[in-house]
Amino acid sequence: GAVVSQHPSRVICKSGTSVKIECRSLDFQATTMFWYRQFPKQSLMLMATSNEGSKATYEQGVEKDKFLINHASLTLSTLTVTSAHPEDSSFYICSASKGADNEQFFGPGTRLTVL
Amino acid sequence: QKEVEQNSGPLSVPEGAIASLNCTYSDRGSQSFFWYRQYSGKSPELIMSIYSNGDKEDGRFTAQLNKASQYVSLLIRDSQPSDSATYLCAVMGSGAQKLVFGQGTRLTINP
């Protein structure tokens, strides 16, 4: 199998606070993990690519100081949204790749609402 | 020009019929192609991957790839209401780790 979990599934926070989202590959070691954001009725937008033990590669327009990514092990990556604002409210989804065949398996997503 | 293009739909198909979903891509060097299904409010689920020209079948699903025409499609046979979802085409370009997604096609199967 290829199971990816995310925690929390839903979070509501006040403007100005920070939120950490965890992404875990449960039954495989993920060479690479990816973080996406999806606004209503839009497709997925890649935010960053993360390899274990190295700095994440951010997509153009994504602020690396605002969206902190840590990939401490082959099964865990975290995304921290710092000083969250209402415009950061979105569906955040991680995916993980085993490497072989380039298939990416998605976590269930985290719905962030910033008040 | 968008890198990966799909008809956004909605596409309505009667139950039991064949649903045909299409996708074109601009990077001629792309090597890996994927179809994901996404139910409303949920994350995408991988349903098919294809890497070489021709057809690949898995149950009721058939993916078709034509690299010369830069075209990939997904056929769903014997469509069921539970197939109603948004279908995302994703392409991995040459030398890249990341997927580029199309906008998705919303499919509705009518009982």
Image (spheres, grey):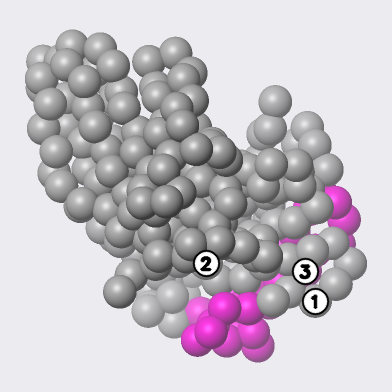
Front position among marks 3 and 1: 1
Front one among A75 and B100: B100
Q: Residue at x 33, y 70 (%)?
A: B2
Q: Is residue A37 above or below residue B108?
A: below
Magenta stretch: give its range: A58-84
| Position of residue A84 measured from the top left corner of the image (x, y, whole percent) | 51, 79
Q: Chain of mark 1?
A: A
Q: Which mark is residue A55?
A: 1
Q: Residue at x 66, y 61 (%)?
A: B97
| Position of residue A78 measured from the top left corner of the image (x, y, whole percent) | 71, 62
Mark 3, residue position: A70
Q: Secondary structure at mark 1?
A: loop
Q: Quadrant of residue A64?
A: bottom right
Q: Chain of mark 3?
A: A
Q: Residue at x 43, y 75 (%)?
A: A88
| Position of residue A20 measured from the top left corner of the image (x, y, whole percent) | 65, 65
Label 2 and label 1 in one chain: yes
Q: Is residue A82 magenta?
A: yes
Q: Which mark is residue A3?
A: none
Please state if A16 lies on the left or on the right of A76 as rendered: left
Amino acid type, callout 2: Leu
Q: Which mark is residue A46?
A: 2
Q: CA distance from mark 3 to mark 1?
A: 8 Å
Q: Is residue A108 above or below residue A61?
A: above
